[in-house]
Image (spheres, grey):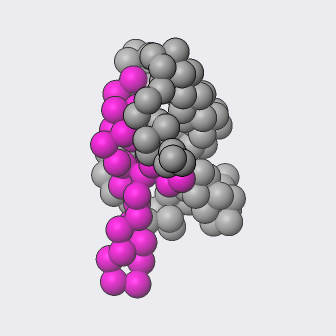
């Protein structure tokens, strides 16, 4: 009988699960390894924002460069876009909020 990916995951050894968790954390840290992405998370912690607002506040980021940063954060499930009319507004996900809490503790 062939095992599905879900059944294989449910039968992982504790060591294999721990390794998977470590890899997930390492991937998450890669996604926030750029100062601009950390700034974006902190700004979104204050309030939801459009790309144009983020570009204006950050000053040095072009819309295409900022879109790349947003894409990495979005694929890391740290932010999510919300469509409001013809604009996308970004906000933190629950995971993003948790990460910002850690960042703020480290920065204090």
Image location of residue 28, percent across then percent down = 55, 35
Q: Nearer the viewer, residue 8 or 40?
A: 8
| Magenta range | 74-102
- The answer to whether residue 93 is magenta is yes
What residue occupies the far front of the structure in this picture?
A: 1
Q: Compared to 26, does 78 lie above or below? A: below
Instruction: Report whether 20 appears left or right of 103.
Output: right
Q: Residue at x 35, y 68 (%)?
A: 82
Q: Compared to 4, does 35 lie above or below? A: above
What residue occupies the far bottom of the structure in this picture?
A: 86
Can residue 22 be seen at all in this image of the molecule? no
Q: Nearer the viewer, residue 82 or 14?
A: 14
Q: Residue at x 38, y 18 (%)?
A: 105
Q: Residue at x 46, y 62 (%)?
A: 53
Q: Give the quadrant of the C terminus.
A: top left
Q: Nearer the viewer, residue 44 or 25?
A: 25
Task: Give the mark count.
Answer: 0
Image location of residue 93, percent across then percent down = 34, 48
- The answer to whether residue 39 is magenta is no
Q: Residue at x 51, y 67 (%)?
A: 52
Can residue 95 be seen at all in this image of the molecule? yes
Image location of residue 48, percent across then percent down = 33, 57
> Residue 31 lies in what quarter of the image?
top right
């Amino acid at each position: 009988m062939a095992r599905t990916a879900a059944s294989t995951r449910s039968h992982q050894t504790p060591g294999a699960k721990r390794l998977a968790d470590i890899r997930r954390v390492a991937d998450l840290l890669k996604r926030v390894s750029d100062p601009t992405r950390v700034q974006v998370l902190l700004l979104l912690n204050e309030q939801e924002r459009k790309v144009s607002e983020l570009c204006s506040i950050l000053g040095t980021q072009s819309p295409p460069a900022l879109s790349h940063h947003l894409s990495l954060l979005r694929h890391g499930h740290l932010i999510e876009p919300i469509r409001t009319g013809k604009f996308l507004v970004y906000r933190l996900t629950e995971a993003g909020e948790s990460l910002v809490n850690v960042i703020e503790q480290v920065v204090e």
